[in-house]
Image (cartoon, helix red, strand yellow):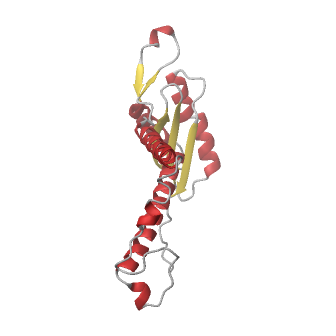
């Protein structure tokens, strides 16, 4: 799982858990479940349908203080900035799009679509011994692309030789064809399930 995706899922899960828990506790007070089931709620929490979450005294406790409104505005500004930062990170392009080719000067303006390079890399990887299926995609920036490969090995395939062949074959050819000195890659391997054998 990519780091950005993991952070998004954790933040959404925490936010959802907090909102769901608070909502259920407030609903319990609204349906008078604390009294019916003889439950004890936290002090100041609404426990009957007539209670409110924030009483007038709580809402106006610090409004007369000189620090109150600057603190509220600063807190809201921080929340707004964090929300905008999160939104911009989601909109930022995570794929290279078009990858410029290196090598001789006459190729300086030639670009290769990331999907074309990924398709060729996957097709080349499928030709390796012990590989049943292969998928590839490119991540990173145009100047620093990173290959991500998902390989399904034959039931008797060995990861060591497959990885060695992948580095010396498809990845090396992709690096040379794009004129790059290096092409980082991540490989995820899984083994195809064995077919059931009938016992005689």
Q: Give the camera-side residue of 92 and 173.
A: 92
* Residue 1 showing in the rendered view: no
Q: Quadrant of residue 184?
A: top right
Q: Is residue 172 above or below residue 59?
A: above
Residue ranking furthest to the top:
105
In the drawing, does residue 120 fall left or right of residue 7? left
What residue sits 61% from the left and 53% below the top? 158
Left/right of residue 65 with respect to residue 23 in the rendered view? right
- How far from the left and from the top, in percent, is residue 197? 49, 72
Q: Nearer the viewer, residue 196 or 98?
A: 98
Residue 175 seen anywhere in this rendered image of the structure? yes
How many numbered marks have been drawn onto this rendered protein structure? Answer: 0
The percent position of residue 195, horizontal first and vertical second, equals 47, 67
Above or below, 122 against 58 in this view is above
Which is nearer the eye, 49 or 155?
49
| Residue in the foreground of this view, choosing between 48 and 136 | 48
Residue at 38 percent of width and 76 percent of height: 51
Residue 116 place in picture, x, y as percent = 39, 32
């Amino acid at each position: 799982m990519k780091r950005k995706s993991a952070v998004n899922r954790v933040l959404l899960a925490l936010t959802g858990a907090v909102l769901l828990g608070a909502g259920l506790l407030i609903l319990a007070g609204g349906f008078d479940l604390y009294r019916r089931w003889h439950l004890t709620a936290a002090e100041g929490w609404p426990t009957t349908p007539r209670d409110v979450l924030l009483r007038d005294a709580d809402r106006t406790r610090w409004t007369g203080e000189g620090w109150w409104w600057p603190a509220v505005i600063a807190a809201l500004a921080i929340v707004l900035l964090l929300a905008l930062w999160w939104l911009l990170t989601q909109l930022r392009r995570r794929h290279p799009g078009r990858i410029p080719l290196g090598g001789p000067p006459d190729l300086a303006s030639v670009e290769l679509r990331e999907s074309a390079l990924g398709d060729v890399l996957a097709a080349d990887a499928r030709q390796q011994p012990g590989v049943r299926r292969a998928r590839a995609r490119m991540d990173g920036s145009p100047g620093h692309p990173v290959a991500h490969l998902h390989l399904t090995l034959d039931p008797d395939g060995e990861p060591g030789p497959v990885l060695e062949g992948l580095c010396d074959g498809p990845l090396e050819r992709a690096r040379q064809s794009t004129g790059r000195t290096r092409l980082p890659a991540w490989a995820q391997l899984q083994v195809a399930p064995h077919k059931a054998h009938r016992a005689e």
